[in-house]
Image: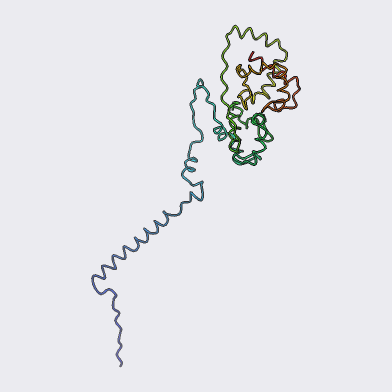
């Protein structure tokens, strides 16, 4: 009978040193793989650059409380905003994006025709509202000066060189006796109420803040040289326009008598 030979298989581990190496690798290799995978996951690309909504600032804004409490002293003097501040807080909603066909800030082509109208005319029209823009840009609490500053600021970003108007000085308080004596005189004028109404609706845009060199209402020094020309000359300037002021302050639908009543009203405050 032939003999059966069984081949012996030798182990790859021949020495104690090889055994130690195999044991060490069995522990080290899985650990290294886990560390590499963890590093790969945690060091991925910064998605905040491609997706601004995931940036730290955007996340912080979303985590802010819905409302905040501001403590304001009602007796503190009101600080009027500069043109840039008003634009950023009120006007940017449309003028930064061009919404509702509003001319974008800095767009020289869109502002060119508007700038040609002049500072006084453009401010007056914008204050009353133009097309889809509500009066004062929808911010009824803006003062005449603040609104005029915003118009000047936006026009200047498109190449104009308009001066932002200074705040209107507070009128000096009249003594009680003087105020009582002047009240009957004002009441005696039948056109006084009409003149004030026309002033509030049309003339205030420029004469309240001194826009484009318009004499401020109540400013005796500014009105003095104009009073010397006589009432007839003042009426003619108001009706036909003068310097930056358009005819009838831009409201051509006003009757001549109403324009004269507004002139009488403003003159009456500086006599």
* Left or right of 198 on screen, residue 17: left
Instruction: Note whether 122 is above or below 30 in the view shown.
Output: above
> Which residue occupies the foreground of this view, 54 or 10?
54
Q: In which quarter of the image is residue 199?
A: top right
Q: Name the residue rendered at 73%, 25% in the picture.
A: 240
Q: In which quarter of the image is residue 203?
A: top right
Q: Name the residue rendered at 51%, 47% in the picture.
A: 52
* Left or right of 243 on screen, residue 86: left
Q: Where is residue 143 in the image (x, y as percent from the top left)?
A: 59, 26
* Extreme residue toward the left, this view: 16
> Which residue occupies the foreground of this view, 69 or 155?
155
Q: Position of residue 192 (x, y in %)?
A: 70, 15
> Which residue occupies the foreground of this view, 93 or 250?
250
Q: How many labels does the image show?
A: 0
Q: Name the residue rendered at 41%, 57% in the picture.
A: 40
Q: Name the residue rendered at 51%, 22% in the picture.
A: 77
Q: In which quarter of the image is residue 218?
A: top right
Q: Where is residue 30 in the image (x, y as percent from the top left)?
A: 35, 62
Question: How are the residues colored?
Answer: rainbow
Instruction: Note whether 170 is above or below 47 in the view shown.
Output: above
Instruction: Note whether 164 is above or below 15 in the view shown.
Output: above
**Quarter of the image with the N terminus in it:** bottom left
Q: Where is residue 264 in the image (x, y as percent from the top left)?
A: 69, 16
């Amino acid at each position: 009978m032939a003999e059966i030979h069984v081949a012996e298989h030798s182990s790859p581990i021949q020495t104690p040193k090889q055994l130690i190496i195999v044991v060490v690798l069995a522990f080290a290799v899985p650990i290294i793989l886990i560390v590499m995978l963890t590093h790969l996951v945690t060091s991925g690309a910064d998605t905040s650059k491609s997706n601004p909504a995931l940036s730290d600032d955007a996340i912080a804004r979303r985590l802010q409380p819905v409302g905040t409490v501001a403590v304001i002293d009602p007796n503190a003097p009101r600080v009027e905003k500069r043109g840039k501040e008003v634009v950023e807080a009120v006007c940017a909603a449309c003028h930064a994006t061009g919404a509702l066909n509003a001319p974008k800030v800095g767009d020289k082509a869109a502002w060119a025709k508007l700038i040609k109208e002049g500072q006084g005319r453009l401010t007056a029209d914008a204050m009353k509202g133009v097309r889809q823009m509500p009066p004062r840009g929808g911010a009824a609490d803006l003062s005449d000066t603040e609104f005029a500053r915003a118009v000047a600021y936006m026009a200047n970003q498109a190449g104009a060189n308009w001066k932002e108007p200074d705040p209107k000085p507070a009128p000096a308080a009249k003594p009680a006796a003087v105020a009582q004596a002047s009240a009957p005189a004002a009441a005696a004028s039948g056109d006084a109420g009409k003149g004030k109404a026309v002033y509030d609706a049309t003339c205030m845009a420029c004469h309240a803040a001194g826009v484009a060199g318009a004499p401020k209402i109540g400013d005796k020094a500014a009105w003095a040289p104009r009073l010397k020309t006589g009432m007839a000359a003042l009426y003619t300037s108001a009706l036909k326009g003068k310097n930056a002021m358009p005819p009838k302050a831009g409201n051509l639908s006003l009757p001549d008598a109403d324009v004269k009543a507004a002139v009488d009203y403003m003159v009456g405050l500086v006599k």
